[in-house]
Each structure stands twice: as structure tokens, then as C-alpha cells.
């Protein structure tokens, strides 16, 4: 049947079917949108494949030492001759060990979780149960707004306010008075370092976790809470012992997602981490470096490497980061889908 | 139960203490975040003199016209790509895909959210700026932003299209409309508020990205050229990142001004997105 | 509604690009943060008379300058470091000196910022390799006898450049030429593998070095002389360095000039030479040519012509004191300027 035509007064002709109508607009639509879906699907695979292929010379050149050595050396650009390892060429002295960066990323992200997870849970609980009904929309809006603040703005505040405060007030006080605690004693440093990075990352990650935890708790019916109270527990006990365990899958998923975000965060960390090279932090105020930050700060140096090996080693670093965050994300999404299926959603 | 009501048992005190602690955490977190807000606005707004909207950056000072124009241009171009690909993906998923394919696509798009920004930036730098030879360019920067914005639009469109009431669709088919026409005249208009919300959320994300743009759009001290390749584009987040470390007060002013502008834009897009959600809720409740 | 939205977007687009002179040639200069302040002064003056060319300047580090000049993204790669043989073999570029600059060692030691401490290559090498950890170390006191009482037992925070930097290049060359253990260790380059020092901080760009030094008591940093005014304003002290003749000298026009003259005659035609640790009793040990790394084959006739015009201007009008004095640079001697002009003529 022809397309719907509201007959206009006086109009009697029906246009002959166009090419589009003959092929079938539906087939065209299906084809185009299918292509779009294919593109969305393929992005990750294309990126991963490309990066691995591009980094392959570095993977062969560096071998296992990439993961075990703390020394990152792009080699002597002003020397003579080159070195060859496993068939690939590098400048004399070149040795790419990423242990410092992998360690930095891991420690920063883990410490961030240690700080941010309890805080987020507390904030989410108080948002759901203690904030007066009138302020609730405002509080919620505020939390969501915080999640949208660009990371450079956090980095800006970190550089101008946080780092000087840590370097000149907090760190000297802590190392002087709490120096007996492991990792709190020693040099007070410049303020750029692990403590500043963890602080900033926590601020960035808390709004995301709070929003998800709050949503997950609200979606949960009140049965568990009321049943627990009926059995004589206090409201806090009901919360922690009955409701939270029932939504733990959602919380674990959001924690994992936040962990992935902390691992991959680049700009804010870059501005406050202290850009450590070849050295491990001796306390929480020492400079560190993360994989994401070091790629940005070392990229231009790497481009001066005549053999190109430094650039490919950075690509290898990007691969490592990519694969780790992919795994974390996939596990988190898997848990969330498992939770949804269990709830019958 | 009686003990809990009179509140004399120790465990009730413990409960009250924990709740008080939770509120303290809320106040602390909101307090710090509010302090950051206030800091940026307090330093940035005075620096937002009218001239900066009309003069470009000059190395270490000047204005923000090139950065503002560049940010809008990059986000706009990125949105064009994202709406085409994202809407297409969502339509295919909802209308044409088998259930297993739906699960796979939704999963892959969700995973896209967590990619580190520098990985995308580095990939596009090597692939487009170097190997393809496009240099720092609008298209590379827009593609970088598009990859980040895509999942938000796809998800929003997906949910919005799925929620179109079956009755409407069936009514249209009963009147003789072919599937393509159903999609264009029934589904899309109904899903529009949801899709627009997704677009606005994506815009907020795109406004704030830096790392991927450093190596794709590059930087320019001049207003953007009408060229897809071989012409770098400036953007606000770059100003915040680099101008704050210059030892000149004028540069710092510009960095704060850029940061304040970014916060204002993000705030506005957030507000718009929320009002769309309420508009849609209001509309569906009115029927 | 849709039409108005589309119109609004189109208007926004037009406004954002409308102001652009479509006929102007675009040149990109990127690289050394040491040359950046001078480049900005030059471009501001040059653009006044030459409206048909638009030169964007960026302070991104010499490493970036070299790599982006090689890849063709930038027309002028500003660098304090000349290219090495391996790099030249891969990509033959022109290393064109535009001015003579120097580098000072800044420090932030409460109580000593208003005087000039004496520092030498071996002592600096010790600080940056972690052998010398405290300001009251015997080796520092030995060359600073009059300040020995003011040097306290505080840990030194050595600040190095995190990005690929020409300042790192000239600083590490000073360490290499003066200290055998550094020569066989990290050596020199725009990026070196810094020895493991737990307090060592990396900063980005000369501005980052200034800011980090300012914010960190007991820190030490190598900073380009174009930032000397800023470091003085920030209250940082700068050192008198030991030169090849064993004398401790400050970076002044005389000492920089003395070092430049000593190596004037030895500069080859391709002008890739180190001016570090020059002989002479009054020579300042850390000076260098500021290079414009340029690809001789530009591929675009208009850009090449505009590029040559600007570089020639920099070598003539640009050598005037009203540009160089603010950044404490020296103009090129006649013979060197002539060699630079000969290299510029090769650009096409």
C-alpha cells in the first residue's frame, strides 16, 4: 500500500514510487544503522589491535624487563652506534622499564579506593536517609554537578591550593609528629606527590560512586530495612547489615568502575604528581608517576628518539593501561548485569 | 523494639554516632567540593572582562576568543559525528537487532565509557596525525571527543527508543505506515527529549576533555579555520592546563577565566539536561 | 524550533570562524620554553608590520620543538639543543642559531636567597645523583666557606625537567663535561635517565621549574636566563658556577660574551656545537645558541618564503637590545649570524 497520504483538496495524483521506495526505505535504514552499530562495536577492537601492532617492536625489544625494571632510559641520542635486541634497534643505553609507573598507578588507585570508598558509602547513606526531603533535590543535583567538573579544573585547584598546603603545612607537620608511622616519616617533599594525587582522585571519584550507590539503594525496596528493624536492630545496623549486603553487587560494580577511572585519569594527576622518574616513593609525600601521566609527559621526549623505540614503548605502556582498564570495566559491567538478571530486571 | 524506641541502649548510641559521622562525611565532601567551586569562580569571574571574548590568546596573555570558538567547534563537530553514529546504533539495536546482538552491542558501548583518555589521544595521534598525515586538525580532535561522547548518546537513545509505548507503534502500523516511517514520525519524536538529554550529558563530557585533544587538535593562537585537516584548533581546557604554570599574573588570570567559563558551561548543560528530564516526566504524566 | 536551532548553530559557527583572515599564511613555532619569551616579543613586533602571516607560538619544550619540526607539524622548532648525529642521519634539518642564551641554577634556601652560593659541576652532579643529600654537606660547605654556618641540615629537593628539554640538555652537558662519573652515568640529552633520588621532582617547562622551586623550600632547579627576572621577583637565589678555569662566575653579559667569543671561531658551518664549559677565566659555563630547527624542504612555497622573511628579520631587526635585554640574551656575533643566514637561504 502506498505511504499514508492525507488527500489534499483537489489533489488526485499519486507520485510513482521513487528508487528509495522501490529498494525499500527499510532496507536502507537497516543497512545504514547497522553500519553505525558496527562502528560503535568495532572502536575498541580497532584501537586495541592498532596499538598492539604499533607497539610490537617495543614488546619484542623490551621483553619481560618492561615489567620488572624501574629504569626508563631512552638511550643516548648523541652517542654513536645503536643497540639491537631481538631484532629491533634502539639507541645505545636504551632500556625501557615501566615498573615505577605501573607501581605508581596501582598504589595511587588503590589508596584512592581506600580513602574514597568508605567516604562515598557514608555520603550516599546520609543522602538517602538523613538529608531532609526539602534539600534532597539540591543535594542530588550538587553531587551530579561535581561529577561533571573537568579534570583540569581539579588539577588547577590542586596545583594552586592543595600542593602548596601539603608541601608547606601538612607534610612538615605529619613527618615531624607522626613520623613513627610507616610511610609517614621522612622527607616532607614539595607537596607534589602521592598524597596530592590521592586527594584529588578521591574528590573526582566520590561523586560517581555516591550517585551509583544512592541509586542502587533507592531502587532496592524497603523490605530488608523494615524487616531488620522489626527484629530489633537499630537503623544503622539495619542499613549496614541488611540493606547494603543486598545491594553489594551494585556497589562492588561501582567501586570497580571508580577504580578503572582512577587508573585512567590523566590531567589532574599530571598536574600534581611530581613526575618521578626511576625512583619509588619512600613515603606518602614523595613524588610519583602514573602510566597515564607519564605518557603525556614523556611523549615529546620519546619523539626525539631517532630509532623510534621510545615512542613504541610508550604505545606499549598505553596498551598495558588499556588492557587493565578494559578488564576492570568488563568485570564491573559483568557484575552489574549479573545483579540485574538476579533481580529480574 | 521498646529499647530502640526509648533510645537508652548502647547500640542505639552507636547507631546515632555512625549516622552523625555519615552526615559529617557529607558535609566534609560537599564542603571541599564547594570550596573548589567557590575558588575557581571567585578568581575566574573577575577575570571575565568583556574584551576576552573578542581577543585571541597571544602566547602568554590576551583573550579567550580562539579557545571559546575552538571548544564550541570541536564539541559541535564531535556531536555531529556522535549523533549520526550513536542514533544509528541505537535505532539498529532497538529495531533490527536480535536479542543476543542487542546484549553484545549494549555491553560494548558500556565498556567504551571507561577507556582512559590518554589511550584514545595517543591512538589517534599515531593513526591520524602522524600516519595518515592529517596533522593537528579539527577532524582528529572531533573524533577524539566523539569516542568519549558516543556511549552517553547511544545509551540515552537506546533507553528512550525502548520506552516508546508499543500502542503508538502498533497504531501507526495498523494505519499502514512502513517501518521506516514509523521510526521517523513516531519513535524519534517521542524519544527526542531522552535523546537530547543524552546529547547534553555528552556535551558536558566533551567540554571537559583535555588529554585526547592535546595530541589531536594541538593548539592555535588564532580563531579556527574552516578546514578539517592540517589546521590546529585551540580549546579552553588547554588554557587552564598551560597558562597556570606561566610565571605571569596575566596568564594566571586567563587560566582562571577559562576554568570559570568551563564550569559555567558545564553547569548550564547540566541544568538543561535536568530540565529536559522533568519536561519529559511532566509530559508523560500529563497524558 | 528545529529551524531556529539550526540557524543559531550556523550563526555560531560563522561567528567563530568569520573573524579569520582566510588569506593569511599560518606558521607554527613550538618548542623551547627558554626561547619562548623572546619569540613572543619577536612575533608581537613582527606581526605589526606583516599582517599577511600569522605566527602561533608555543612553549612546549625543546624535545617537542625538534620532533614537530621533523614531522612537519611545526615550521619552526625552537630548541636549546642541536640535533645529534643519529637524528640528523634520520632527518637532515637545519639547526639555525638565532641568539645566545644561558642558564642559571636557582635555589630556594631560606636565609640564603639574597646571596650567590658557589656551586660546581661535580657538586651539582652529586646533588642530582643523590650522593649529596643535605645542604650542609661537606662538599657544599667546602666551596662556600663564608656561608657554612647558614647551611642547615635540610634535605635538598632537586628539580628536573619532566618534558624533553633543551635546558636539560645544556645542564647535563655541563655535568658531563665537568664530572667523569656523570659522563659514564646518565650522560647528556634532552631527556636523561635521572638517577634515583626519592625527593626529586619533575616540573614541566621553565615556568614549571620556577613555580616548583618557589613553592618548595630547600629545592634547587636549572632555569633558563630568560626567566631570571621572574626568579628574582619570586625571591629565589641563583648560584655562581665554577667554570673550566676554576673561577666562580655569575651569568652577566660579560661572562656570557666571554664564553661565546671563545668558541666563536670553532663553530662549524652546520652550526651544531656545544658552548658549554667554554675556556676562559671569565667565561660563564652554561651558555648555548638558541636554535630554530627548520626543515630545508618545506613543501609549500608561500610558507617557505614567509618563514625565511621572519627568520631573516629575527637575525637583523630582532637582534636589537629592545628584544634581547629583557630576556638577558646576547646577539649573535657577525660571523655566526652570517652562517645562520647562509643556512636560511637553503630553505625552500
Image: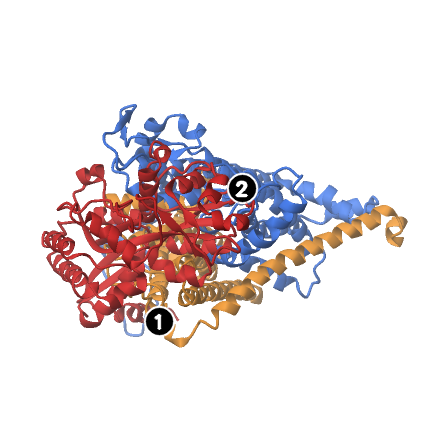
Residue at image mark 2: A109
At label 1, counting other C-alpha atoms closer than 10 Å, the crowd grade (few under 14, some 14-19, many 20 or more) is: few
Residue A64 appears in the picture as rendered: yes
Vertical comparison of C55 with B16: above or below: below
- Near-viewer residue (C87 or C127): C127
Name the residue rendered at 39%, 61% in the picture. Answer: B239
Residue B26: image location, x then y, percent? 66, 56
Residue B88 appears in the picture as rendered: no
- SS at circle 2: helix
Depth check, mark 2 against mark 1: the one in front is 2
Residue A66 placement, left or right of C57: right
Q: Which chain is blue?
A: A
Chain C as rendered: colour: red
Vertical comparison of C57 with C200: above or below: below
- SS at circle 1: helix
Q: Evaluate if marks 2 and 1 touch, with contact meaning CB atoms under 8 Å apart.
A: no
Chain B as rendered: colour: orange
Residue B235: image location, x then y, percent? 36, 60
Chain of the residue under label 2: A
Amino acid at each position: 500500500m502506498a505511504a499514508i497520504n492525507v488527500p489534499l483538496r483537489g489533489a488526485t495524483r499519486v507520485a510513482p514510487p521513487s528508487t528509495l521506495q522501490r529498494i525499500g526505505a527499510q532496507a536502507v535504514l537497516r543497512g545504514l544503522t547497522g553500519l553505525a552499530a558496527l562502528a560503535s562495536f568495532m572502536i575498541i577492537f580497532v584501537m586495541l589491535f592498532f596499538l598492539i601492532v604499533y607497539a610490537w617492536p617495543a614488546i619484542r625489544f623490551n621483553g619481560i624487563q618492561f615489567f620488572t625494571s624501574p629504569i626508563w632510559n631512552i638511550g643516548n641520542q648523541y652517542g654513536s652506534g645503536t643497540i639491537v635486541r631481538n631484532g629491533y634497534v634502539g639507541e645505545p643505553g636504551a632500556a625501557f622499564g615501566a615498573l615505577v609507573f605501573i607501581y605508581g598507578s596501582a598504589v595511587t588507585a588503590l589508596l584512592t579506593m581506600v580513602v574514597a570508598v568508605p567516604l562515598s558509602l557514608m555520603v550516599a547513606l546520609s543522602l538517602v536517609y538523613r538529608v531532609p526531603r526539602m534539600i534532597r533535590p539540591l543535594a542530588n543535583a550538587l553531587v551530579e554537578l561535581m561529577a561533571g567538573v573537568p579534570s583540569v579544573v581539579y588539577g588547577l585547584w590542586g596545583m594552586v591550593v592543595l600542593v602548596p598546603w601539603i608541601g608547606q603545612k601538612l607534610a612538615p607537620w605529619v613527618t615531624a609528629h607522626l613520623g613513627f608511622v610507616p610511610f609517614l616519616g621522612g622527607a616532607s617533599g614539595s607537596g607534589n606527590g602521592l598524597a596530592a594525587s590521592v586527594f584529588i582522585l578521591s574528590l573526582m571519584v566520590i561523586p560517581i560512586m555516591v550517585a551509583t550507590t544512592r541509586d542502587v539503594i533507592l531502587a532496592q525496596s524497603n523490605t530488608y530495612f523494615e524487616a531488620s528493624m522489626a527484629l530489633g536492630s537499630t537503623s544503622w545496623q539495619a542499613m549496614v547489615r541488611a540493606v547494603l549486603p543486598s545491594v553489594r553487587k551494585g556497589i562492588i560494580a561501582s567501586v570497580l568502575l571508580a577504580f578503572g577511572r582512577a587508573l585512567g585519569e590523566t590531567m589532574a594527576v599530571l598536574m600534581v604528581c611530581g613526575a618521578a622518574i626511576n625512583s619509588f616513593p619512600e613515603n606518602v609525600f614523595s613524588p610519583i608517576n602514573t602510566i597515564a601521566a607519564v605518557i603525556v609527559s614523556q611523549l615529546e621526549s620519546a619523539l626525539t628518539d631517532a630509532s623510534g623505540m621510545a615512542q613504541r614503548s610508550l604505545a606499549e605502556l598505553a596498551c598495558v593501561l588499556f588492557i587493565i582498564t578494559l578488564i576492570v570495566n568488563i568485570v564491573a559491567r559483568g557484575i552489574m548485569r549479573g545483579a540485574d538478571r538476579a533481580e529480574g530486571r | 523494639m521498646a529499647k530502640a524506641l526509648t533510645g537508652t541502649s548502647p547500640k542505639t548510641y552507636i547507631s546515632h554516632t555512625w549516622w552523625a559521622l555519615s552526615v559529617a562525611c557529607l558535609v566534609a565532601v560537599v564542603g571541599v567540593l564547594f570550596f573548589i567551586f567557590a575558588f575557581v569562580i571567585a578568581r575566574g569571574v573577575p577575570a571575565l572582562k568583556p574584551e576576552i571574548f573578542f581577543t585571541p590568546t597571544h602566547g602568554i596573555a590576551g583573550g579567550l576568543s580562539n579557545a571559546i570558538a575552538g571548544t564550541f567547534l570541536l564539541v559541535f563537530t564531535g556531536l555531529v559525528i556522535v549523533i549520526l553514529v550513536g542514533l544509528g546504533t541505537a535505532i539498529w539495536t532497538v529495531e533490527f537487532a536480535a536479542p543476543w546482538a542487542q546484549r553484545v552491542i549494549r555491553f560494548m558501548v558500556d565498556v567504551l565509557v571507561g577507556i582512559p583518555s590518554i589511550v584514545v589521544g595517543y591512538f589517534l595521534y599515531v593513526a591520524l596525525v602522524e600516519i595518515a598525515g592529517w596533522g593537528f586538525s579539527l577532524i582528529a580532535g572531533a573524533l577524539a571527543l566523539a569516542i568519549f561522547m558516543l556511549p552517553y548518546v547511544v545509551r540515552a537513545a537506546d533507553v528512550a527508543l525502548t520506552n516508546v509505548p508499543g500502542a503508538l507503534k502498533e497504531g501507526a502500523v495498523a494505519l499502514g505506515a512502513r517501518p521506516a516511517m514509523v521510526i521517523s514520525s513516531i519513535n524519534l519524536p517521542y524519544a527526542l527529549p531522552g535523546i537530547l538529554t543524552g546529547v547534553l550529558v555528552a556535551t558536558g563530557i566533551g567540554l571537559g576533555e583535555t588529554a585526547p585533544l592535546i595530541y589531536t587538535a594541538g593548539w592555535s593562537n588564532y580563531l579556527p579555520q574552516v578546514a578539517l585537516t592540517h589546521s590546529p584548533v585551540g580549546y579552553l581546557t588547554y588554557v587552564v592546563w598551560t597558562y597556570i604554570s606561566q610565571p605571569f599574573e596575566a596568564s594566571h588570570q586567563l587560566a582562571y577565566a577559562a576554568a570559570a567559563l568551563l564550569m559555567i558551561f558545564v553547569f548550564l548543560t547540566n541544568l538543561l539536561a535536568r530540565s529536559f528530564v522533568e519536561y519529559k516526566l511532566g509530559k508523560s504524566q500529563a497524558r | 524550533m528545529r529551524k531556529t536551532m539550526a540557524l543559531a548553530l550556523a550563526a555560531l559557527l560563522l561567528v567563530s570562524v568569520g573573524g579569520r583572515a582566510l588569506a593569511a599564511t599560518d606558521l607554527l613555532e613550538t618548542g623551547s620554553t627558554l626561547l619562548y619569551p623572546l619569540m613572543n616579543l619577536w612575533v608581537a613586533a613582527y606581526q605589526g608590520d606583516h599582517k599577511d602571516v600569522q605566527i602561533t607560538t608555543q612553549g612546549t619544550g625543546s624535545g617537542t620543538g625538534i620532533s614537530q619540526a621533523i614531522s612537519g607539524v611545526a615550521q619552526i622548532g625552537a630548541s636549546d639543543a642541536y640535533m645529534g648525529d643519529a637524528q640528523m642521519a634520520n632527518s637532515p634539518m637545519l639547526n639555525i642559531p638565532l641568539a645566545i642564551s644561558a642558564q642559571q641554577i636557582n635555589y630556594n634556601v631560606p636565609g640564603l636567597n639574597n646571596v650567590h652560593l658557589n656551586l660546581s659541576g661535580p657538586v651539582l652532579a652529586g646533588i642530582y645523583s643523590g650522593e649529596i643529600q643535605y645542604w650542609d654537606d661537606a662538599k657544599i660547605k667546602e666551596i662556600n666557606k663564608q656561608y657554612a654556618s647558614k647551611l642547615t641540615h635540610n634535605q635538598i629537593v632537586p628539580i628536573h625537567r619532566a618534558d624533553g628539554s633543551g635546558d636539560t640538555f645544556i645542564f647535563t652537558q655541563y655535568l658531563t663535561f665537568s664530572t667523569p662519573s656523570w659522563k659514564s652515568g646518565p650522560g647528556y640529552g634532552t631527556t636523561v635517565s635521572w638517577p634515583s633520588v626519592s625527593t626529586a621532582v619533575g616540573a614541566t617547562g621553565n615556568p614549571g621549574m620556577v613555580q616548583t622551586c618557589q613553592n618548595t623550600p630547600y629545592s634547587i632547579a636549572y632555569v633558563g636566563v630568560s626567566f631570571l627576572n621572574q626568579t628574582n621577583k619570586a625571591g629565589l637565589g641563583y648560584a655562581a658556577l665554577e667554570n673550566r678555569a676554576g673561577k666562580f662566575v655569575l651569568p652577566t653579559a660579560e661572562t656570557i660574551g666571554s664564553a661565546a667569543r671563545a668558541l666563536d671561531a670553532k663553530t662549524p658551518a652546520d652550526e651544531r656545537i656545544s658552548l658549554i664549559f667554554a675556556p676562559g677565566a671569565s667565561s660563564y659555563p652554561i651558555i648555548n645558541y638558541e636554535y630554530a630547527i627548520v626543515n630545508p624542504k618545506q613543501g609549500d612555497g608561500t610558507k617557505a618564503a614567509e618563514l625565511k622573511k621572519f627568520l631573516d628579520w629575527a637575525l637583523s631587526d630582532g637582534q636589537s637590545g629592545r628584544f634581547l635585554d629583557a630576556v638577558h640574551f646576547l646577539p649573535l656575533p657577525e660571523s655566526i649570524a652570517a652562517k645562520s643566514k647562509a643556512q636560511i637561504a637553503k630553505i625552500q
